[in-house]
Image (spheres, rainbow, N blue to C red):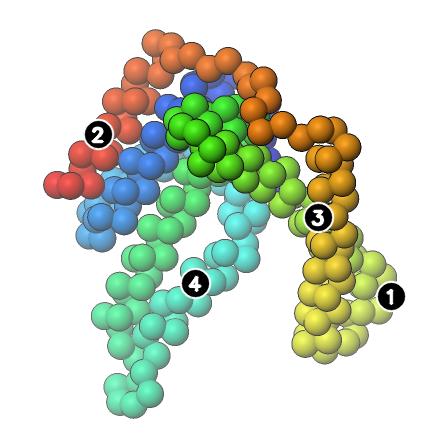
Amino acid sequence: MLTYEPGETVVHDLDPRSKLAVQIGFAATALAHTAPRALLGLSVVTAVVLALARVPLLRTLYAYRFALVILAAGPLVAAATLGPPWIDLEAGLATALASYRVLLVLLVSAAYVRTTPVRESRAAIQRTVPGKPGQLLGIGVALVFRFLPVVQSDLRTIRDASAARLGTERSARERATTIGLLGLSRTFDRADRLSLALRARCFSWNPTLPALAFSRRDVPALGVAVALLLTAFL
């Protein structure tokens, strides 16, 4: 599960706005360049980011396992044709490169999530986007970061409970239907309890957020962000 983990890495010490800038620049460059040579360079950048943030690659890939299935299926579907020659290798290769770009963006995002507290993410967004839009966006990001791991935990609990009751002997469709319906029911219950808890705690649109300040360590990160943004237009 991708959640924040305290640490003393270089990436942990960076201002969250610097990390967001690097993410935006990386995503823009990944979407702008599709050549294998460009993807090789982006792969090196991704490896450096993961190493600096000390993000375990195998655990991260396992956390993205459902997204990986979709990314892997994309090239197969794109390559299949309804008539001769039945397999379009060029279309499959183009989709495979697109899927690989998405994977690189997900890995860089994982480094941000693992090294940035939720409150700092909200503060960075609200102080970057002014007014109510920034407050709404910051609240949305904070709630997603906190709510999604709880929903994932509920789904695992439902799956384990079903397996303990010999649910594995049912068909795949029955298992998916049971877990899906129970998961939706539990999610709506969680949402109702969250709404009640927010009202009980006098939810504020403008809470006291942690202080953010750029430091000398942010200069290289901002430089990398600017360089990535510039390469998107080259």
For residue 233, what is the image quadrant?
top left
Q: Amino acid at mark 3?
A: Ala
Q: CA distance from mark 3 to mark 2?
A: 41 Å
Give the mark nearer the N terminus: 4 vs 3: 4
Q: Is residue 61 left or right of residue 228?
A: right
Quadrant holding the C terminus: top left
Query: Compared with residue 216, is residue 67 higher up or lower down, i.e. above or below?
Result: below
Q: Is residue 175 left or right of residue 23?
A: right
At x 43%, y 19%, the residue is 15
* Nearer the camera: disc 3 or disc 2: 3
Q: CA distance from mark 1 to mark 3?
A: 27 Å
Q: Which mark is residue 198?
A: none
The residue carrying mark 3 is 191
The residue carrying mark 1 is 165
Judging depth in this view, the residue of 132 and 70 nearest the camera is 132
Mark 3 residue element: helix
**Proximity of marks 3 and 2: CB atoms separated by less than 8 Å:** no
Q: Amino acid at mark 4?
A: Ala
At x 75%, y 69%, the residue is 178
Q: Which mark is residue 227?
A: 2
**Proximity of marks 1 and 3: CB atoms separated by less than 8 Å:** no
Q: CA distance from mark 2 to mark 4?
A: 30 Å
Judging depth in this view, the residue of 160 and 126 nearest the camera is 126
Mark 2 residue element: helix
Q: Amino acid at mark 1?
A: Arg
Query: Compared with residue 104, is residue 119 higher up or lower down, i.e. above or below?
Result: above
The residue carrying mark 4 is 72
